[in-house]
Amino acid sequence: MRQPLIAGNWKMHKTAAEGQALAQAIRQGLQTDQVEVVLCPPFTALSAVHAVLHGSSIRLGAQNMHWEDAGAFTGEISPVMLKEWCRYVILGHSERRQHFHEDDEMIRRKVAAALRHGLTPILCVGETLAQREAGETGAVVAAQTRRALEGLTPEQAMGVVIAYEPVWAIGTGRAATGADAEEVIRRWIRGTLAEHFGVEVAQRVRVLYGGSVTPENIAEFVCRPSIDGALVGGASLRAESFLGIIHETARAKA
């Protein structure tokens, strides 16, 4: 059985004080231990949120990192710096690919570095609207998955969480259907894992959906056998909506 996982990506929102207040509200309102919960604030709020979450079951994650342990990389954060605070790190998000020109090779190096330092990557893959309309969804998602995990052993691959985030659904209010997401994840993500790492790895890796997730639509996704939870953007910035997603996930998976 794969434990459901709900991760909140706060993106470039929340000061340290605001993050502390939001984390406290989520901790106080959490009413299930059936779902693993991860909060991913901006770097500047990691310490404050870590202090709030200490002693709870809620995990802390970062939104990005460099692949080197140290060096002359002004403005970057290394896995060595993150592992003091974090259990998880989001890598390959479409906004990083689009706005900061991260390519598959950079993401592969980041995934390998995260695993080397005991961090669990949440690897994001997904197609743009143009790619979807051109019928390229499967090829794009399979290639992103394969290239990001290239060079890993099956044991290492099992330490990765994958988030399928169709780019056209992120922050647009236009979510994919549960059936569409299940098809992509089952065929092109788990299928790629099975091809390169074996059926056991494909069955054990947790795969999330992301893209305009709300408390009202989360059950449509997590009731599917291949979908283990969600990477949540906008709805993770409010305790009520994020807690609603967590509790609806627990009910649907039960």
Image (cartoon, rainbow, N blue to C red):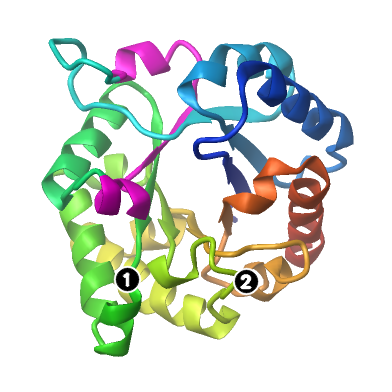
SS for callout 1 = loop
**Residue at 16% across, 50% down:** 103
Q: Nearer the viewer, mark 1 or mark 2?
A: 1
How many numbered marks does the figure carry?
Answer: 2
**Residue at 60% across, 36% down:** 38
Counting other residues with Cα less than 10 Å from the Cα at mark 1, is it few (<14), some (14-19), or many (20 or more)?
many
Residue 221 position (above or below residue 101): below
Q: Which mark is residue 127?
A: 1
For residue 176, side relative to residue 250 (left or right) = left
Identify residue for label 2. Answer: 221
**Does residue 42 appear anywhere in the picture?**
yes
What is the magenta range?
A: 77-99
Quadrant of res 68: top left
Q: Position of residue 121 (x, y in %)?
A: 38, 39
For residue 210, side relative to residue 50 (left or right) = left
Quadrant of res 100: top left
Residue 167 position (above or below residue 21): below
**Does residue 93 appear anywhere in the picture?**
no
Q: Nearer the viewer, residue 15 or 104?
A: 15
Q: Nearer the viewer, residue 34 or 105?
A: 105
The amino acid type of the residue labelled 2 equals: Phe
Quadrant of res 20: top right
Residue 36 position (above or below residue 79): below
**Residue at 70% across, 62% down:** 214
SS for callout 2 = helix
Q: Which mark is residue 96?
A: none
Q: Nearer the viewer, residue 226 or 179?
A: 179
